[in-house]
Amino acid sequence: MALNQRQACGWTRCRRKNRRALCICSLQRRCQLAFDASTTAISRKAAMRRGCAMTASDNSQTGKTMVPGSAEFVRFLVETGQKHVFGLPGSSMVAPLHQLQNTDIRFVPAIHESVAVAAADGYARVAGSATTLLYMLPGLANGLANLYNAWRDETPLTVIASQQASYHRSLGSTIGEGDLVAMTRPFTRLSHEIAPGMSLRFWLEKARSVASGALPGPVFLSIPEDVLEGMVEQTSFRQSAAPSPAIPNVSAVAEALALAQRPLIVVGGQLRRFGGSRAIEDLAAAQGIALAYEPGFADRLGVAPGHPNCFGNILFAPALERTADVVIFLGARFLLEAHPKPSWFPQAQWIAHINADPLKLEETKKADWAAAADPGAFAAALAGAVGANGASAGLVDARRSWLSSLREGMSSAEMPRGQSSYLRAITPLHDALDHGWLVDESVMGIPVVQGVLRATDGHRYMGTTGASLGWGTGAAAGVALASGEPATCVIGDGSLRFGALGLWTLRNENLPVTLIVLDNGGYGSTRYFERQYIQRLGPAAVPQGPGYLGSDFRESGSSVEGIIAGFGIPVAVVEQDDDPRRAIEHAWSQAHAGPNAVVIRMDFGD
């Protein structure tokens, strides 16, 4: 090419290392430099292939073993004990899927990436880790909502997405290409793309250690097609042992609890996941301390719902919230609210907040004392300190009298408006945890579910604090696969529609999952907040009544039972005047044969 032709097309000579640079001027008048190592795309591709062959030959002389990247990836899955892998196939993901056939690992397919991520999320919560495989930018984008849920709930989940081959990378003009790291970074503990020449095994090990580390959570790796299909060095790394967490200084909290007249510990799912539930349950029983779940959604139940001092969700215990004088938030957020109210705990003289993640301390409210600490270690230390120097016998008796008066005063009249209609449908599920795992995506019904459960062991409850709908069906599949036990998925009809494609996975795997669908005719929570909005507007509202645009499905589209039956899942319908208990018990008795469902009709709520 002549010099003037090079200048005309934008090529210039870079003085450093004799490389050329391509100046791409966009309509936004921004200039980007792209270096290409002085070869065309075609010659680069050929050089890379020749390089792989030469590397294999050269490294064989030095004793190094070279294998396809996909083989090294699958070897990692085998050696780390993975029994199931979730995902969807794709053209740039065929290499590892082909290699999986040489192992005992089962590939669990889904027909939408959101389901694959949710299923891996549920699986990881039971098994301790999980991996899901997605196809490039389109697949990753489809899975983002449930990746967000996993991020909120600190799930030790590894998400792997294929990427365009490195020698074809551009500014985004090839199909399926994109900046996957930037897409996932807000919702992961680690997000990284493995370029050719990087150690594949190192980054797989790094991702695994981060996902299950002191601050667990999802991780993401983008792996280009040429890394999966090209030759990489087979390597192994040291496996570090996680030390026991440092014992935190609990003296200030212990002293406050010892002196409190009406103490309250608000627990979050982190307490359960970090192993502190039993210590707090025993402490509360011995010292007369009230227990409650953080407001709104919960990923796990921090203490057993059947504990005598547990008042369920704090939203449903307003008298407790109004009168507590010392409040400890342990392994919870302070506070987790979709629609924050101005103030909490008006009589609290002292509030403490403990969370494993320093970024989650005092997110929306300020406490008198806050610490980033392992909630399990904190709970054990606190129980020891208070047990050695706790409240006097007289004070403990007074606390128990207070708790009894609160219990006697509790009624459905204190339940927030718009949620009392859930009692009829959900009360028959009081022993659901005795029948297996409970996956809860009942949305507005979640506090009711937490309140009616009577189990003295709450470890088999699963929910999500992310509130991205469409999580429950996939999560139930993952929980059933990981546990080998039945699962009950309590889900709203709106959530069921979001997660309808998860029904395919339940049916395909023939899992023992019972779906309890609370059918209120659409998006009941949206309708509730529309009514609240009109009430705030008062006479200025035009029109005066709600329109329920897009949230009223009573005469729209397929019924939920029709959707479920369409996937080959048996379904029973309970009308509003009927008792749901008989249908629920029958469904539980048949779960061993595969998934089934009970649709419970509910009040529309207007």
Image (cartoon, rainbow, N blue to C red):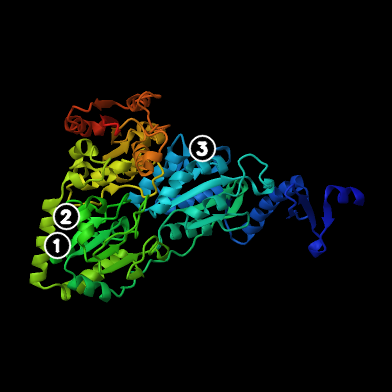
- State which mark lies toward you, 3 or 2: 2
The answer to which of 4 and 451 lies nearer the viewer is: 451
Indicate the secondary structure of the residue bearing disc 1. Answer: helix
Indicate the secondary structure of the residue bearing disc 2. Answer: loop
Task: Tell me the crowding category of disc 3: few under 14, some 14 to 19, or many 20 or more residues within 10 angstroms, Cα based.
Answer: some
Q: Do the residues labelled 2 and 1 touch (CB within 8 Å)?
A: yes
Please name the residue shown 72% across and 49% down the image: 28
List x then y, in percent, for residue 403.
Answer: 13, 59
Vertical relation: 388 (above or below) 17: below
Residue that badge 3 annotates: 89
3 or 1: tag closer to the N-terminus: 3
Residue that badge 2 annotates: 307
Disc 2/disc 1 C-alpha distance (Å): 8 Å
Position of the C terminus, as image quadrant, is top left
List x then y, in percent, for residue 594.
Answer: 29, 32
User: Label 3 is placed on what type of residue?
Assistant: Pro
Residue that badge 1 annotates: 285
